[in-house]
Image (spheres, rainbow, N blue to C red):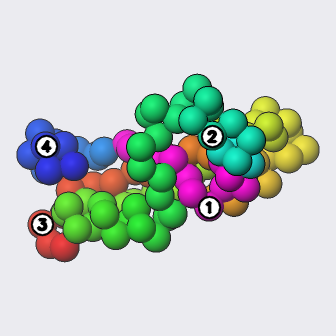
Amino acid sequence: LVKFHAALRADGVLLISYANASSIWFQYRWRCHGRKNAFAPAQRRVWTWHAFKTLLRRNCFQPISGPTCFDSPLDGRRACAGLASSRFIGALALVVCRRSTST
């Protein structure tokens, strides 16, 4: 995050994703497949929104949008759109941040 902060222009935004520990789907997939899960190597760190937001702020980023969650069996089902984007369903989350000068 320090390198992103240094590389980002003052008016730039950072779009970043994280593995969502609050997701029921993530928990299910981890319990059933564990390290055999194809995404396991990329998910060395799994975060709750609160912990990830704290990490961003500690590294001088201010969240301006998100988290928007996705990657669940409900993705693409119009009738489930509201539920599918819940942070308790989507296994991945996206956040938009701006650089901040204070922590």
Checking the image for residue 101, the label placed there is: 3
Residue 21 in the magenta stretch? The answer is: yes
For the residues labelled 2 and 4, the Cα–Cα distance comes to 31 Å
Identify the mark nearer the N-term, 3 or 1.
1
SS for callout 4: helix
Identify the mark nearer the N-term, 3 or 2.
2
Q: Mark 2 points at which residue?
A: 34
Q: Name the residue under label 4.
A: 3
Q: Is residue 25 in view from this perspective? A: no
Q: Position of residue 86 (x, y in %)?
A: 70, 57
**Vertical comparison of 99 with 102: above or below:** above
Q: Is residue 12 in view from this perspective? A: yes
Identify the mark nearer the N-term, 3 or 4.
4
Front-most of residues 98 and 18: 18
Judge the density around disc 3: few (<14), some (14-19), many (≥20) Cα neighbours within 10 Å: few
What amino acid is labelled 3 in the image? Thr
Q: Along the horizontal axis of the image, is 103 left or right of 13?
A: left
